[in-house]
Image: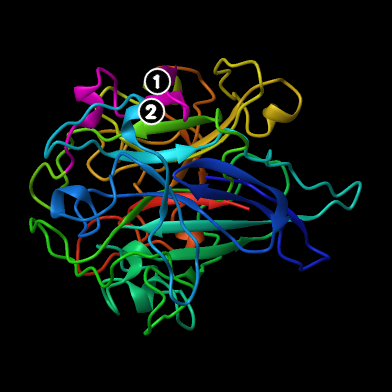
């Protein structure tokens, strides 16, 4: 996940550094207007190696959105990252960040600073979207109730200016989202495509899936061939919709927890555990599957205690979400006492380890359906936030 900012009084698009990849990583020296996300895909789709596709689900790729998108280009495979395979002779990387995301900063009523953040997100193929969503395209039109293409799409949320009060948004505040980037660039939505396969019908227990799923996302690329990547690996949790353990247990095969945040250089050398699951308020079986990170530069994880303390206390800004089936789902969170869902954006626990994480942005705020709001449909489970980035 990545964070860029823009002034609310200006509406130009942020200029992003583009990575140019020809075999080994080479870096462009100039900013370009085109958005090029770093992504990883879920192993169950037709583009994944277990299905005979060209993309390794433990690899990190650069997508080039266009009307006729090329196949995403490899940045780093599982070998340099130190990931050993689990089932199907592959591994599954399910969250990533380059650790250089811009700090989220509170807006000031004293100075007049008003910053808008744009949240990009992707879900799995079982999401239906909140019924309060407006005109398409969005999860209502692209999800299970519509074109069944949401899992390879990227949605966009415009988060309005807000004060530095924990949590970022209270329960009950609805903002919603609209579709932004498309999986394949072809109608019915037909936005700029990522080079993935669509549609992806919600078919519990069927392998392989009919379409692809974006399950890791970052809009900042590597700054050098030795850049550090922060990531997590999937657990072997039982998905209550699939009815089977559709996650392949890459974390266990690599001797770590699925809630741990790992760090590796894309130049190789293997990974280390950078942040332990317990420091995030997670148990050994909770599966972290979306990540945004601003690392303070000292190389060590310093957990945030209060939102925005990373501005003055030298803490690391780490936001995350968990996969459906994680035991922490349903646990009262640290801010609201509300049951945590797989659609919430969470922050590190204010009470430290052994206390639950806090809901930083509720699922309903960004247009996801939940049991607690009575908005789920088709499948009686919360919409799962699979990947996210904040610009």
Question: Which residue carries the number 1 mark?
Answer: 271
Which residue corresponds to the image point at 25% horizontal and 58% vertical from the top-left?
47
Q: Is residue 158 left or right of residue 56?
A: right
- Quadrant of the image occupied by residue 288: top left
Question: Where are the magenta residues, as a range?
Answer: 247-275
Which residue corresponds to the image point at 80% horizontal and 55% vertical from the top-left?
114
**Mark 1 and mark 2 residues within 8 Å of each other at the beta carbon:** yes
Whether residue 346 is visible here, answered yes or no, is yes
Q: Nearer the viewer, residue 377 or 44?
A: 44
Q: Is residue 270 magenta?
A: yes
Estimate the x, y position of residue 329 in percent, counting from the top left: 30, 40
Seen as rendered, the residue at the extreme right is 111
Q: Residues within 10 Å of mark 1 (few under 14, many from 20)?
A: many
| Colouring method of the image | rainbow
Q: Secondary structure at mark 2?
A: helix
Q: Secondary structure at mark 1?
A: strand
Estimate the x, y position of residue 19 in percent, counting from the top left: 58, 48
Is residue 183 positioned above or below 242 on the image? below
Question: Which residue carries the number 2 mark?
Answer: 81
Q: Is residue 204 left or right of residue 45?
A: left
Which residue corresponds to the image point at 57% horizontal and 39% vertical from the top-left?
222
Q: Is residue 61 magenta?
A: no
Q: Earlier in the sequence, mark 1 or mark 2?
A: 2
């Amino acid at each position: 996940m990545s964070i860029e900012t823009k002034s609310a009084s200006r509406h130009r698009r942020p200029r992003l550094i583009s990575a140019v990849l020809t075999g080994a990583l080479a870096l462009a020296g100039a900013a370009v207007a085109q958005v090029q996300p770093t992504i990883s895909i879920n192993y169950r789709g037709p583009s994944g190696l277990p299905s005979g596709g060209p993309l390794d689900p433990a690899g990190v790729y650069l997508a080039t959105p266009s009307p006729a998108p090329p196949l995403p280009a490899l940045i780093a495979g599982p070998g340099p990252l130190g990931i050993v395979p689990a089932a199907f002779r592959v591994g599954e990387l399910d969250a990533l960040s380059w650790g250089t995301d811009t700090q989220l900063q509170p807006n000031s009523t004293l100075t007049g600073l008003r910053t808008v953040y744009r949240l990009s997100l992707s879900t799995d193929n079982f999401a239906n979207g909140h019924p309060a969503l407006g005109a398409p395209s969005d999860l209502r039109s692209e999800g299970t109730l519509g074109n069944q293409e949401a899992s390879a799409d990227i949605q966009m949320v415009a988060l309005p200016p807000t004060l530095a009060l924990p949590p970022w948004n209270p329960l009950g505040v609805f903002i919603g989202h609209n579709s932004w980037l498309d999986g394949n660039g072809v109608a019915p939505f037909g936005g700029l495509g990522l080079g993935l396969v669509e549609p992806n019908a919600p078919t519990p227990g069927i392998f392989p899936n009919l379409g692809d799923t974006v399950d890791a996302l970052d809009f900042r690329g590597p700054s050098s061939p030795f850049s550090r990547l922060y990531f997590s690996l999937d657990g072997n949790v039982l998905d209550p919709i699939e009815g089977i353990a559709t996650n392949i247990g890459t974390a266990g095969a690599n001797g770590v927890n699925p809630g741990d945040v790992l760090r590796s250089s894309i130049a190789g050398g293997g990974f280390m555990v950078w942040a332990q699951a317990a420091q995030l308020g997670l148990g050994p079986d909770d599966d972290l599957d979306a990540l945004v990170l601003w690392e303070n530069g000292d190389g060590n994880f310093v957990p945030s205690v209060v939102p925005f303390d990373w501005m003055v206390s030298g803490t690391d800004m780490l936001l995350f979400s968990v996969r459906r089936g994680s035991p922490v789902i349903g646990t009262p969170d640290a801010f609201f006492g509300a049951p945590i869902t797989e659609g919430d954006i969470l922050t590190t626990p204010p009470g430290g380890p052994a206390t639950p994480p806090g809901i930083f942005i509720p699922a309903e705020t960004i247009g996801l359906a939940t049991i607690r709001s009575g908005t789920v449909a088709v499948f009686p489970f919360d919409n799962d936030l699979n990947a996210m980035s904040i610009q």
